[in-house]
Structures are given as C-alpha cells and as structure tokens.
Image (spheres, rainbow, N blue to C red):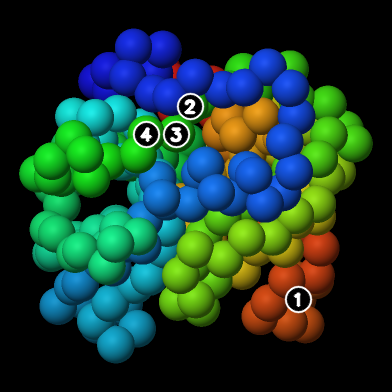
Amino acid sequence: TVASPTETTQTAPTSNMSVGQVYDRAAPGVVQITSLSDDASLAGGSALGSGFVVDKAGHIITNFHVVDGADEIRVSFSNQDTVQAELVGVDPSTDLAVLEVDASASALTPLPLGNSDKVRVGDPVVAIGNPFGLDRTATAGIVSAVQREITAPDTFAISDVIQTDAPINKGNSGGPLLNMRGQVIGVNTQIETGGVAAGNVGIGFSVPANPVKD
C-alpha cells in the first residue's frame, strides 16, 4: 500500500506551466531503474527503465515488466546516487509495480498524482524518462486518445489507457506522463512501432494514474 499522495506529495499549481517549468518540478522525482538478472531472457542480464517517487517514505512506481524476473533492482536519482530497491508490490494485470528504497526524505521528490479520469483528447502532456539510457529526457505532445486498450504482461486487458504522441521509446517504461500542472496522469508503458521500427512513431500508451492510487 502506498501512502496517500495528498498527504505526502507536493501540491500542484492551480494554473498551467510551461514544459520547462513542468520539467524543473518533476525531473528530480524521476529515477532510472536497472534490473539485473541471471535470466538469459534479459538482454545482457539487465533491463533499463524509468520510475518516479510518490512519497517521502521511499516508494517508487514503475512498470511490472521493467522489474519482472529481476534478481537485483537498482535505482539512480538525479543527484547520481544509486541505491538498491526492494520490490514491495506488483500488479501484472495493470503492468504496475511498487519499489521501496532506503533514502533520506530530503533526497526524495514525490510527484503528485492527478485524476486521470479528467484527461481529455488534446490536453498537452510532458513525458520524462530514460529512453535508451539518456537519463531524464523530456518530450512533449498531446493526449491523442483515451480509453484505449492494451495487453498486460499476464495477457489481461488494461482499459482506459491514455494514448499520446509525446515521443517515448525503450527505457521510458515506468516513467511519468504529466499534465501541465505537473501532475502524473499516466505511467508510460508501451509504444506502437507499426511493425517496421524499434523506435517511436508517434503512438505511445500510458496506464492511467488512478489505478496507481489504488
């Protein structure tokens, strides 16, 4: 169980910010996640993803598929500190996982969770993550569609998914999709490549933030 975001996270501003302002507020709370495994199915024995801090107790949200099968999970913060994380909760049906790190409260910058039910097509959004290991990269776009459906790692359907054209790539998984008030409205999870490319073609999918609260 993650502590209530209203009790532990910074308050979102009442008016929209610029992309730069959203980045300045949110980037310190975005982490890089390295999953290490002896399993040969993980390329090179490791997988790279993103995540974000949700409270001062050291809880971090990421995708389940980023940490699935990991024997060791390392979390790197914006100040370059790297700590070992414990996997404390998973929900493969929504491709979400909760990590916990032992870090001082001053080192943790929690991101506020928004109400993903209020997301509308055309809303401007910012994605922050670690595409191809390029840490804390910001990309921007709009909400392209809502209530999309994608397939979770356990083959269950994830509904009410947010589609965005903010460029996301391998390594962005588990990172936040933010509105212009700096609130997390989704967890970047999958991309559509059209079957001919390995990178972004303008169609990305984010698991909505409300299941994260649950």
Which of the two discs, 1 and 3, labels the residue nearer the N terminus?
3
Label 1 close to label 4 by CB (< 8 Å): no
Which callout, 1 or 3, points to the residue nearer the camera?
3
Vertical comparison of 78 with 38: above or below: above
Q: Amino acid at mark 3?
A: Leu
Q: What residue is drawn where x is 72% and y is 49%?
A: 19
Name the image quarter holding residue 213: top left
- For label 1, the SS is loop
Residue 111 badge: 3
Locate residue 121, reporting x and y percent. 88, 33
Q: Tell whether label 3 touches label 2 (CB within 8 Å).
A: yes
Secondary structure, mark 3, is: loop
Q: CA distance from mark 1 to mark 4?
A: 36 Å
Dot 4 and dot 3 residues touching (CB under 8 Å): yes
Please report contact status of discs 2 and 4: CB closer than 8 Å, yes or no.
yes
Residue assigned mark 2: 112
Q: Earlier in the sequence, mark 2 or mark 1?
A: 2
- Identified at 72% across, 36% down, the residue is 17
Query: Observer-nearest residue: 157 or 35?
Result: 35
Q: Is residue 79 left or right of residue 70?
A: right
Q: Residue furthest right?
A: 122
Q: CA distance from mark 1 to mark 3?
A: 34 Å
Q: CA distance from mark 2 to mark 4?
A: 7 Å
